[in-house]
Image (cartoon, rainbow, N blue to C red):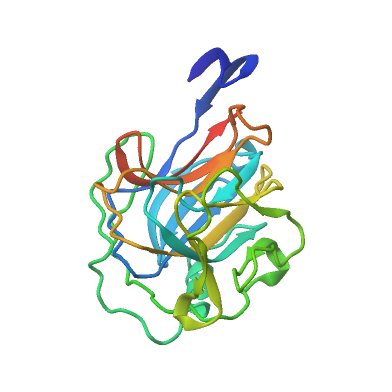
Amino acid sequence: FHLTMNRGGNANLVFYHSSPRVEMSSPTFQQGRWYNVFFTQTASKRIFYVSGEKVGEVEKLASEAKGEGVMKVGPHQGSVGMAIDELVFYNRSFAAEDIRRIVQQQSSSETSTSTAPISSAPPQSSDSATTTATPTTTVAPAATGPLFSDSLMHYLSFDGSLSDQTGSSGVSQVSGVDCSRSGFVAGVGGGGSAYHFQDGCRVQLDSPVHQATEWSVSFWFKPDSVIDSSSGRVDFLYGSPKISGMPCYTCFHLTMNRGGNANLVFYHSSP
């Protein structure tokens, strides 16, 4: 918990806390492999999956987890570069079997039988729950539209465009960074394209993506180099306030190696 004033340019007197974090302990993501990340907020829980396998779960009411601000997609400057594809936000939660259906639908028959690329150590924090998992790495999602298309909030396929295919959100490149080495590359499974993020070049969803209700997000990523505890901080999704320079006490984040924590963490600050 925090009681603070004039922090980050906010002149208000603010009382807030960071909510329970759903985490995957000390994973390793191999260079050049595609991985799926899937987060779902049910009415009472946050559940975290990597490549179709559950890796963490915490109790958290959806009614207590309203988000705001904008969402930046891609790693920050100085972080490892990566390709990202098939970014989908849903306005509902999903059971494990439906998540596996979605991941499988985006996959071809060509999968890796190796479970070595992802490893997970025992839980290290009392305010989060993690599950040891070594899921099979799905390497070839197909270039087809997402399942449950009637539940889409945002859908960025990155097939030659940064636009939201639902038409519901403004999408823009984050300004003030070097995007000369970022751009479209071969997509997952060789079908369509993905967007390669490097040198802090990111894209931003300008409308809120989570509103105190059940919701989910899924995407694929392929790192340029191994991501593990020695890689330094890596952001995948990072919430920011709508007004630059102001703190965002209710933004959502998916990050790894932040503040000395080697876990892959999905969290947000509560009102």
Q: Is residue 11 left or right of residue 126?
A: right
Task: Out of 128 and 152, give the one closest to the viewer.
Answer: 152
Q: Is residue 247 left or right of residue 135?
A: right
Residue 56: x percent and y percent? 39, 51
Residue 68: x percent and y percent? 66, 39
Q: Residue at x 31, y 44 (%)?
A: 232
Task: Out of 198 and 38, give the one closest to the viewer.
Answer: 198
Q: How many labels, in total?
A: 0
Residue 181: x percent and y percent? 47, 60
Q: Residue at x 66, y 39 (%)?
A: 69
Q: Residue at x 35, y 81 (%)?
A: 111
Location of residue 137 with respect to 61 vertically, above or below: below
Residue 33: x percent and y percent? 35, 70
Q: Is residue 166 left or right of residue 4?
A: right
Location of residue 199 with respect to 142 vertically, above or below: above
Q: Is residue 149 left or right of residue 157?
A: right
Q: Quadrant of the C terminus?
A: top right
Outermost bottom residue: 109
Task: Out of 244 and 115, give the one closest to the viewer.
Answer: 244
